[in-house]
Amino acid sequence: MRLLVLGSTGPTGLLLLQQARDRLWSVTTVVRSPDKLAHIPGQVDIVRGNVFDPSALASALRGADAAISVLGAHAGFLGKGATDVYSASARALCEALPEAGVRRLVFCTSAGVERDDPAEKLFYRRIAKPLFLQRGYDDMAEAESLIRASAMDWVLVRPGRLVGRDPSAPLRVSPRWRPAGGVDVSRVALANFLIEQVTDDTWLRGTPTITE
């Protein structure tokens, strides 16, 4: 299996690299600063490039079986700042994968992308989310719309709030809303779930929403 990972310098991306290597998969990643992955052993093909450039992505995708994106925003996701990380990368991937002859895309957004999830706590849904997070979630929604309109074999994975600890409970998966009472999901569990979507068709063209 040959896999392209985007967002590999982040905490979830690093776990993806490790889990793919544990499965003896060939892994390529595109990053602006390869020095950030200098500690990664040679089993990962590190390509310097712009993840928003379809040509660069198509080149990196040659011979791949699938792509996983865990690209995310940082400070621009909060407050009045907006981000286009999700929609811009989705747009580039929607162009690059067909050009490279790759069909499978596993793309990570968030459980918060749904505006009226009944499983969300009322304060979060009515106050915190609209005031501080909505513009970022709107960009995720745009990315999902772009990918849904494509002819690719896509899976849109929506994790709950990410935490750095090891999994503390079995993973729960819902087709749209958060699982009842679910809030957190460990990055380890998320990375494992993302990897599984490369070969498992259970959630093909679906929006699995995951918490513990």
Image (spheres, rainbow, N blue to C red):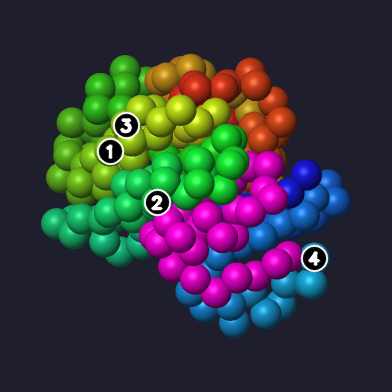
Q: How far apart in space, not on screen, are marks 1 and 4 (Cα)? A: 34 Å
Residue tagged 1:
142
Disc nearer the start of the sequence (4/2) = 4
Select label 2 or label 1 by which is in front.
2
Residue tagged 2:
92
Disc nearer the start of the sequence (2/3) = 2
User: Contact (CB < 8 A) between labels 1 and 4?
Assistant: no
Residue tagged 3:
145
In this picture, is 41 found above or below 72? below
SS assignment at label 4: loop
In this picture, is 2 found above or below 122? below
In screen coordinates, is 135 left or right of 190?
A: left
Label disc, if present, on residue 43 of the rendered structure: 4
Amino acid on which the number 2 mark rests in the picture? Ala
Q: Residues within 10 Å of mark 2 (few under 14, many from 20)?
A: some
Quadrant of the rendered image containing residue 195? top right
Image: magenta residue range: 44-71
Residue 9 x %, y % = 56, 66
SS assignment at label 3: helix
In this picture, is 26 found above or below 145? below
Amino acid on which the number 1 mark rests in the picture? Glu
Front one among 47 and 115: 47
Instruction: Name the quarter where the C terminus is drawn.
Output: top right
Residue 111 x %, y % = 40, 33
Amino acid on which the number 4 mark rests in the picture? Gln
Amino acid on which the number 3 mark rests in the picture? Ser
